[in-house]
Image (tube, rainbow, N blue to C red):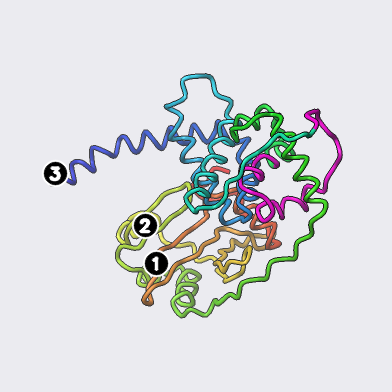
């Protein structure tokens, strides 16, 4: 009884926090697409980039109470993303790198590199701090002074590092990474696909363990089948067509919405299966930047007007 009362007392705080989060999203909306691209390229992977993006948004929102001075929202977001990624790399015992000024000129330069090609090589060729410096300066148009503040170095080191990186990028060609072998033949996933396409809630839930986690990025989280039944699935499932596809070398399930214009991507999902049960389910239903990038990669249109998604 006491536990139930505590959970009930927490509910008004949770609802107020959702309202504040919605207001925060409105304030940063214009920066989110570029921020997602930054996270994608600094990590070297759309999947790792999506994880970094979500963590950045949550950290940026949660950390605002510590800012007592007027704050540039763009710089703030990129600073949080950069420090979060570098901290991850340090925990993984990766070499984060240093940025040295050297004997390089510190004036602006205008020679054009094929930036789009360079972006695919950054994470493989350079340390996390170098990659961040290049992206911030060359792609996302921060000044050397702003970059220096974000990556914690000097403007001279920013100029010199970017110039050295450009020279190395011109000299380097990388072979395409080999594709991972993908198996869509897991019998549990086959059953899940059928149940999802049929719109059969109970058949879907029967495939989950009791305490399965449903993670709908930057939307909500559910920690059991009962929470799913009374939460995200309380009004049933739409019964849209679901297909197993490969997205950025990862096996996923793509859910399609059909209208007079054809098939549009409604959701992207993947699951973790252990002992013939789904233990973890991840959905990108609310992730506009992710859905749009995936739609472009797969050659479909995204579904823009979706219930509860304020796009």
1 or 3: tag closer to the N-terminus: 3
Nearest the camera: 143 or 35? 143
Q: Which residue is mark 2?
A: 234
Q: CA distance from mark 3 to mark 2?
A: 27 Å
Q: Secondary structure at mark 2?
A: loop
Residue at x 32% of width, y 56% of height: 227
Q: Residues within 10 Å of mark 2 (few under 14, many from 20)?
A: few
Q: Residue visible at 45% across and 77% down?
A: 191
Residue numbers of the magenta segment: 105-134
Indicate which label's residue lies in the foreground, 3 or 2.
3
- Nearer the observer, 156 or 133: 156
Residue 220 locus on image (x, y percent): 42, 49
Residue 155 falls in which quadrant of the image?
top right
Question: Can you say whether 178 is above or below 108 in the image?
Answer: below
Q: Secondary structure at mark 3?
A: helix
User: At x 41% / y 63%, what residue is drawn?
Assistant: 280
Quarter the C terminus occupies: top right
Q: Calculate the distance from the C-alpha at mark 2 to the C-alpha at mark 1.
A: 9 Å
| Marker disc for residue 201 | 1
Mark number, residue 44: none
Name, please, the residue furthest toward the left. 1
Residue 70 to residue 249: above or below: above
Q: Which mark is residue 2?
A: 3
| Residue closer to the observer: 296 or 272 | 272
Residue that extends furthest to the top in the rendered view of this protein: 69
């Amino acid at each position: 009884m006491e536990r139930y009362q505590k959970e009930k007392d927490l509910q008004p705080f949770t609802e107020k926090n959702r309202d504040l989060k919605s207001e925060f999203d409105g304030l940063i909306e214009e920066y989110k697409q570029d921020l997602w691209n930054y996270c994608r390229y600094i990590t070297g992977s759309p999947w790792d980039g999506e994880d970094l993006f979500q963590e950045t948004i949550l950290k940026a929102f949660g950390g605002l109470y510590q800012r007592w001075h007027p704050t540039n929202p763009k710089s703030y977001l990129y600073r949080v993303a950069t420090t979060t990624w570098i901290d991850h790399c340090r925990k993984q015992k990766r070499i984060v790198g240093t940025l040295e000024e050297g004997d390089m000129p510190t004036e602006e330069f205008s020679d054009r590199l094929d930036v789009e090609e360079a972006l695919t090589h950054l994470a493989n060729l350079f340390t996390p701090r170098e990659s961040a410096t290049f992206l911030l300066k060359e792609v996302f148009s921060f000044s050397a002074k702003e970059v220096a503040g974000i990556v914690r170095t000097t403007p001279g080191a920013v100029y010199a590092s970017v110039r050295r990186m450009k020279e190395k990028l011109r000299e380097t060609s990388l072979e395409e990474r080999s594709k991972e072998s993908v198996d869509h033949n897991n019998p549990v996933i086959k059953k899940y696909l059928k149940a999802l396409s049929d719109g059969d809630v109970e058949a879907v839930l029967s495939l989950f363990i009791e305490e399965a986690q449903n993670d709908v990025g930057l939307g909500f989280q559910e920690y059991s089948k009962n929470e799913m039944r009374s939460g995200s699935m309380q009004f049933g499932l739409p019964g849209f067509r679901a297909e197993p596809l490969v997205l950025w070398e990862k096996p996923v399930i793509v859910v399609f919405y059909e209208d007079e214009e054809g098939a549009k991507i409604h959701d992207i999902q993947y699951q973790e299966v252990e002992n013939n049960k789904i233990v973890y389910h991840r959905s990108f239903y609310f992730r506009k930047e992710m859905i749009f990038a995936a739609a472009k990669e797969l050659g479909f249109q995204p579904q823009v007007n979706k219930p509860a998604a304020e796009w």
